Amino acid sequence: MAEVSEREQLIFDVTQTEWDMFQHVYNTGGRASCQDDPETFFKMRMSQWMVYSDEALHSYLDDCRQAYEEGRNLMFEKYGRMMESTFPEEYEEVKKHLPDVADKVEIVDRIVKINLEWDAEMLRDYPNLRKRGRVLTTAEDGIMAGSSMESYLRGELLSYSKRTLELIWQETLAAYEKGESLLRQTIANETLFYGYGSLEEAEAKHAK
């Protein structure tokens, strides 16, 4: 058996912490099916965390630990904020349990803007693969369509500390300026977890 590296363990620890919080998110309609699907959860979340630095991962893990100490659940906060555009009436009840994030909005908007560009590129370059995901923008949110990539990302980022957000912003901007895409890297990681050799192979498979 291959030895697990410190970085691999760190990525797993971050995802395990998220999974533990996710188990304590309660929906008005009952437990969601994805809360009983750890395999998919770990593949998706680890694919994302793999694109960030150890420093960003440690910072977010500190966010999670701080939240535990304060009796907060970052998964609840993320999904709660996503309800604003999909279940606005229920959101009115949920929002009073969410911390104020006014000081994070500006940096979150910057990160989201770049990710929207990256997502549009994914739709252009890998349309069959991309259409299997969420709709793109908050304007498309609804009970039937669910939450968009934009709303999901914004809800998640607003749960991070300002220190973690600054690290994510720096890494997002650095990739963008080099013509790279962290979103593309994330989805490429996902395809590897599902047994594809590349994004191109996955795209061809889903074109059939």
Image: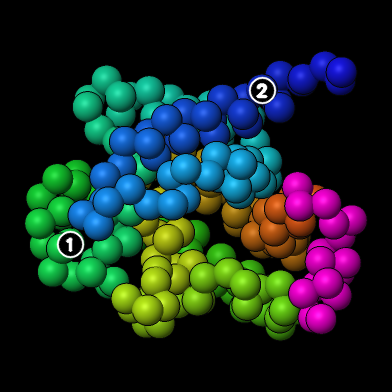
Q: Residue at x 46, y 35 (%)?
A: 18
Q: Residue at x 71, y 81 (%)?
A: 127
* Element marked by disc 2: helix
Q: Position of residue 88 (x, y in %)?
A: 18, 70
Q: Position of residue 23 (x, y in %)?
A: 38, 36
Mark 2 or mark 1: whose residue is earlier in sequence = 2
> Where does label 2 land, which residue?
9
> Where does label 1 land, which residue?
91
Highlighted magenta segment, given as a residue range: 193-208
| Up-down relation of residue 2 to residue 198 (above or below) | above
Q: Is residue 187 visible in the rendered structure shown here? A: yes
How far apart marks 2 and 1 lie (CA) works out to: 36 Å
In depth, the one of 143 and 76 nearer the eye is 143
Using the image, tell me which numbered label, if any, was put on residue 52.
none
* Horizontal arrangement in the rendering, residue 56 relative to residue 75 (left or right): right
In depth, the one of 195 and 94 nearer the eye is 195
| Up-down relation of residue 46 to residue 122 (above or below) | above
* Horizontal arrangement in the rendering, residue 82 relative to residue 42 (left or right): left
Q: Quadrant of residue 35?
A: top left
Q: Is residue 2 magenta?
A: no
Q: Residue at x 38, y 52 (%)?
A: 32
